[in-house]
Amino acid sequence: MKKNILFATCLASTVLMICSNASAASRNKFYVAVPFGYSFVNNSKSSEGSLASTKLKNTPMVGLAAGYDFGEVRTEISVGYRNNMRFTINDVVSTGGNYGIYSSMSVKAYSFMVDLYKDFDIGSEFTPYIGLGLGFTNFKTGDYTFSRYLKSNNQPFGKTATSTGKSSTSFSWRIGLGMHYKLSESVDFGLGYAYNDFGKVTRNDPNGILRGTGTTNKVKFKSNEILATIKFKF
């Protein structure tokens, strides 16, 4: 919670800096952008147990950003929402050589970032860019169940337990590139790519597993994202 408050303070400071620089002499420097696209999610590292298989669901994304253009360098704050990065873990080996199966768990992700972009003036209406963002992602997970089975006869063994979904926050970062096209003095349209590291989601294993902490498993969410952006300049 303290980390969230600290980061929110940094975001507020960035907003004040942007607003303080947006004057009549800097018309079309302040802007609001609406990014939207599709996120191809993958699990780069996990500790869900030996012989386990992890399935993740790709998801659309939509966001909102406010920024200031200093001239070939832009800074902005952004919020992104990914509706359902659902994931399933199967065949988790548990204590005693048996195994367990999870039900699928829904994951909603809200990202809050401070972004820095470098634009490249190539003397045309097209402007290529590269960017870097730092921030955090708040995950909201749904309920899930864990059932333990005997390896010998594939029969349920022990009690099936249900865990309630929760909210958690992880440090996040991203890098990206793309190109904007100037539609008018006040509107740009862009296409781009971003690589996101959202951090990890941890959930309890009611029956215990061999790897990880013994009572939890962790899935780390990363994504390759294809984005379109509409930017309104003031």
Image (cartoon, rainbow, N blue to C red):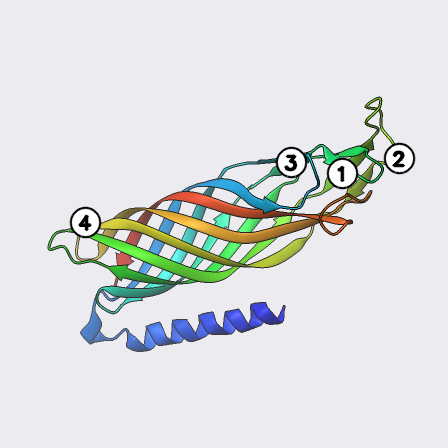
N-terminal of the pair, mark 1 or mark 3, is: 3
When the figure is inspected, residue 120 is found, relative to residue 227, above or below; the finding is below
Give the number of the mark in front: 1 or 4.
1
**Are discs 3 and 4 less than 8 Å apart at CB?**
no
When the figure is inspected, residue 135 is found, relative to residue 107, above or below; the finding is below
Give the number of the mark in front: 4 or 2.
2
N-terminal of the pair, mark 1 or mark 4, is: 1
Marks 1/3: CA distance? 11 Å
Please give the name of the residue rendered at 71% of the width and 43% of the height, measured from the top-left corner: 143
Marks 3/4: CA distance? 43 Å
Marks 1/4: CA distance? 51 Å
Q: Amino acid at mark 1?
A: Thr
Q: Determine which residue is flagged by label 2.
A: 158
Along the viewing direction, whichever of 155 and 21 lies nearer the viewer: 155
Q: Amino acid at mark 2?
A: Gly
What percent of the width, then of the height, locates residue 172?
51, 58
Give the number of the mark in front: 3 or 4.
3
Along the viewing direction, whichever of 161 and 222 lies nearer the viewer: 222
Q: Determine which residue is flagged by label 1.
A: 145
* Residue 88: numbered disc: 3
Give the number of the mark in front: 1 or 3.
3
Q: Amino acid at mark 4?
A: Leu
Number of other residues with Cα within 10 Å of mark 1, as a class: few under 14, some 14 to 19, many 20 or more:
some
Q: Residue furthest left?
A: 123
Q: Is residue 223 left or right of residue 207?
A: left
Q: Determine which residue is flagged by label 4.
A: 183
**Are discs 4 and 2 less than 8 Å apart at CB?**
no
Q: Quadrant of residue 29?
A: bottom left
